[in-house]
Image (tube, helix red, strand yellow):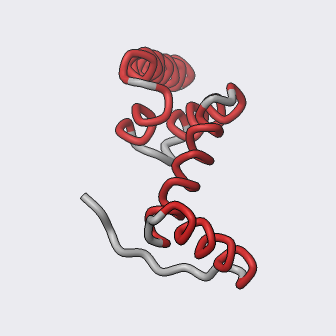
Amino acid sequence: MTTRVNFRLPDELLDKADVAAAATHKNRTEIVVAALQEYLDEMEDQETFKETVVDLYLDGEIGFDALKEVIGRQDAESVRASKTLLDQGDEMADDLAQL
């Protein structure tokens, strides 16, 4: 599935993308998609990025599917289980505080 997006690029960057497209016999979209994919792959390899994504999930800012895309299914399942335990612990602490 693809989604059409609109964004602005500096002229110099667009010119470089056009040269790369001509040199590789690809279109501009293919060049931009490949560059973005490479950038995101590099980000996902960084441990601090993964930790930040886990924090976003634990804070409820992103969903499980987004977490799974970045850290993988098995690790995401572990994080989800941990979050469930943490949430239950918070609820128990709140209940005990009201006694």
Q: Residue at x 42, y 24 (%)?
A: 72
Image point (42%, 75%), residue name:
5
The picture places residue 21, in percent across and down from the top left corner, at 53, 68
Q: Nearer the viewer, residue 14 or 57?
A: 14
Would residue 39 be seen by someone viewing this image from the given angle? Answer: yes
**Residue 7 point in image, percent of width and height:** 55, 79
Above or below for 37 versus 69: below
Task: Note whether residue 99 is visible.
Answer: no
Residue 32: horizontal and vertical position, in percent? 53, 64
Of the 4 image quadrants, the one containing the N terminus is bottom left
Q: Is residue 77 above or below residue 10?
A: above
Residue in the image at 54% along x and 71% along y: 22
Residue 72 vs residue 23: left or right?
left
Q: Is residue 27 above or below residue 73?
A: below
On screen, 70 above or below 88?
below
Nearer to the camera, 51 or 98: 51
Q: Position of residue 57 (x, y in %)?
A: 50, 37
